[in-house]
Amino acid sequence: FLWAFISLFILQFNYDIAIGLFLGFLLHIVADSITEAGIEFWPFKIKIRGPIRVGDVAENLIFVTFLIASITKLILMLI
């Protein structure tokens, strides 16, 4: 959770960068939690895992979908 504190620190200087870092951190944890390997909440030893295999077609489809959405958002911001 160090990135959350770094985001809070950067929030004092630049709102957009802080929000981007925080969302990137949060979405990375969510993405890891839907894989078969899952994530473990230390120290509670609670494991959350999902149905998606790393390197599987479903993972690649999700990646390409978010990549296209991100590039579209970036282009719309620059216009």
Image (tube, rainbow, N blue to C red):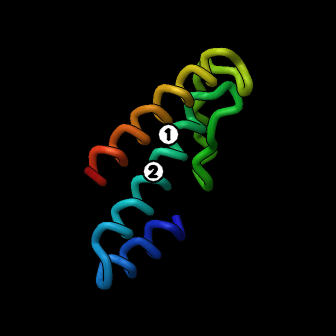
Residue type (three-letter) at the residue carrying disc 1: Val
Could you tell me residue 41's position as x and y percent?
Answer: 58, 48
Q: Which mark is residue 26?
A: 2
Q: Is residue 16 left or right of residue 43?
A: left
The answer to whether the residue labelled 2 contacts the one labelled 1, judged by CB atoms less than 8 Å apart, is yes
Could you tell me residue 29's position as x and y percent?
Answer: 53, 45
Could you tell me residue 6's position as x and y percent?
Answer: 46, 75
Q: Is residue 30 above or below residue 55?
A: below
Could you tell me residue 36's position as x and y percent?
Answer: 68, 25
Q: Is residue 43 above or below residue 13?
A: above
Spatial distance from mark 2 to mark 1, Cα to Cα? 6 Å
Q: Which mark is residue 30?
A: 1
Q: Is residue 53 left or right of residue 58?
A: right
| Secondary structure under the numbered disc 1 in the rendered image | helix
The outermost residue toward the right is: 55
The outermost residue toward the bottom is: 13
At 63% across and 43% down in the image, what residue appears? Answer: 40
* Depth order, front residue of 66/78: 78
Residue type (three-letter) at the residue carrying disc 2: Leu
At 43% across and 41% down in the image, what residue appears? Answer: 71
Please tell me how crowded label 1 is: few (under 14), some (14-19), or many (20+) other residues with Cα within 10 Å. some
Please tell me how crowded label 2 is: few (under 14), some (14-19), or many (20+) other residues with Cα within 10 Å. some
At 31% across and 67% down in the image, what residue appears? Answer: 16
